[in-house]
Amino acid sequence: MLSTLTFFISESFISLRRNGLMTMVAVGTITVSLCIFGFFLLSIINMSNIVSNLGTKVDLVAYASQPLTDTEAENVRLQISRIDGVKEAKWISKDKAWKDFKEEFSDRLKLEEIVDSNPLPDTFFVKMLNPELSAKVSKEIARISLIEEVGFNPNLVDKIETLVEAFRIGGLMLVFLLSLATLLIVVNTIRLTVLARETEIVIMRLVGATRSFIRWPFIIEGIILGMLGSGISIVIIKFTYEAIIVRLQNALPFVTLFTNHFWIGCVYFLVAIVGVLLGMLGGYISVNKQLKEEN
């Protein structure tokens, strides 16, 4: 068994060396395909991450019905914080809100000519754990006695949820199509190697070699090609993605990009597995088609 496996592996390497140009073409094709595949996965993850973070930043704004003392404001803030789905509640007094407003717009508006007194109410900014709970939480906040109005835009939340779901479904469909296209490329590339050894395969069949004996060197050859292509593509993806992350974070500091090392490592692992599986499947399909044509 071990000697047979050693023979298959040695035959695969001999074939790879003998068909050096085709080997380079195959590895290059697999590398390009897997790079596209890997970058696409990372793009989908980043887009989903950005949209999800956007969803968590959908805040509710609650306005007090009257000026509040510090004790009253803290009591309302605690009541809001205890509601299920609320991540954080922050109180902004009407005096501070008016001060901030004047600092921001004093260079563009002459506020003293427009209003005589502070028109802003005490305000509570509420951060959500999940934007899907915004409607329920807003109703709970509205029941608090000192709250007059809750600012809530259900259409925005619905649009964000729809966008997240569209990215997930569309991403899965595109990944499937890209995997299929990569498999076809690998099959056709290894097929060139099979056609170049057509005479050798015919001779092996004439001397009584079984189909399994003929198939395995090509399958192992496909696995080796897949390993080489995936290894090169992982190196390219890793260094390119890290460079892109650094540049984008400097250019767009307000955009949250995906940097979780564990999940990025899972993407690299998936690229390696896909490369090996596609190479193995490509080798099998290519030689199997040749054997069928000879019958």
Image (cartoon, rainbow, N blue to C red):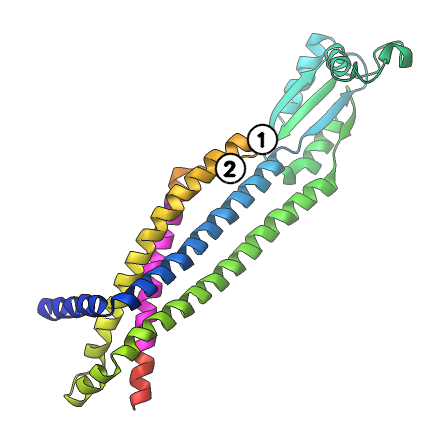
Give residue 155's quadrant in the image. Answer: top right
In the foreground, 115 or 143: 115
Q: Which residue is mark 2?
A: 257
Q: Looking at the picture, which amino acid does disc 1 mark?
A: Phe
269 horizontally vs 213: left or right: right
Q: Image point 35% across, 49% down: which residue?
A: 234
Give residue 156's quadrant in the image. Answer: top right
Q: Looking at the picture, which amino acid does disc 2 mark?
A: Leu
136 horizontally vs 279: left or right: right
Chain part drawn in magenta? 264-286
| Residue 50 magenta-highlighted | no
Q: Position of residue 187 (x, y in %)?
A: 37, 71
Q: Image point 83% across, 11% down: which residue?
A: 118
Vertical relation: 289 (above or below) 136:
below
Q: Which residue is mark 1?
A: 254
Q: Image point 47% across, 39% down: which residue?
A: 244
Q: Image point 40% across, 57% down: which residue?
A: 32
Give the structural element (helix, strand or loop) at label 2: loop
Q: Position of residue 180 (x, y in %)?
A: 45, 66
* Circle on res. 85: none
